[in-house]
Amino acid sequence: MKYSALVGIARPFVSTAIAEAQASKEQVQKAIVLYCDLAVDPAREREMLHQFHTQFKPAAEKFEGYIDVKIVKLRKVVQGRPAPAANINYRFQLTYRSEELRQRWISSDVHKRVWPLIENTVLNRDYLVLLTDNA
């Protein structure tokens, strides 16, 4: 009897948690992903990584629509052509629930303060930027 009463009490909470998880899954499925292929100055690589982890990422995480942000170092091309330009050594990846919410983030004063901390370490500001839809 006690067990069935507990199950009855817990059922609405479990249903809510399942609904929230499903909504979160749907948001990720409809998300946008932005990629930037960056030629980070090797002499400033440590600085860029420090700014990314201590300034940029914590700021981005606070904005509505944020899902994830990563900076990954290119190790090697395993297959396919064309390969990135010889000096491309990092890929920046930003995932947001929608392009509209990403636009709000990049228009913010916070973004205008923290993105230059990354961008000022690149050798060429004419870097490839790809905007994709989660399929």
Image (cartoon, rainbow, N blue to C red):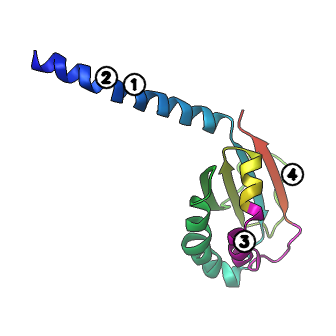
CA separation in Å, label 3 and label 4:
37 Å
CA separation in Å, label 2 and label 1:
6 Å
Compared across the picture, whether 31 is left or right of 61 comes to right
Answer whether residue 89 is magenta in the image.
no
Residue at left offset 76%, top offset 47%: 99
Helix, strand or loop status at disc 2: helix
| Residue holding disc 2 | 11
Q: Earlier in the sequence, mark 3 or mark 1?
A: 1
Labels 3, 4: front one? 3
Label 4 crowding class (10 Å Cα cut-off): few <14, some 14-19, many 20+?
few
Q: Earlier in the sequence, mark 2 or mark 3?
A: 2
Compared across the picture, whether 123 is left or right of 51 comes to right
Do the residues bearing badges 4 and 1 touch, measured as CB atoms within 8 Å? no
Q: Earlier in the sequence, mark 4 or mark 1?
A: 1
Residue at left offset 68%, top offset 55%: 93
Q: Is residue 35 above or below residue 6?
A: below
Residue at left offset 62%, top offset 53%: 64
CA separation in Å, label 4 and label 2:
54 Å
Answer whether residue 111 is magenta in the image.
yes
Residue 109 visible to the viewer: yes
Hey, what amino acid is under mark 3?
A: Asp
Hey, what amino acid is under mark 2?
A: Arg
| Residue holding disc 3 | 109
Image position, residue 80 (x, y; %): 80, 45
Compared across the picture, whether 27 is left or right of 32 comes to left
Hey, what amino acid is under mark 4?
A: Pro
Q: Which residues are magenta?
A: 106-126
CA separation in Å, label 3 and label 1:
39 Å
CA separation in Å, label 4 and label 1:
49 Å
Q: Is residue 39 above or below residue 104?
A: below
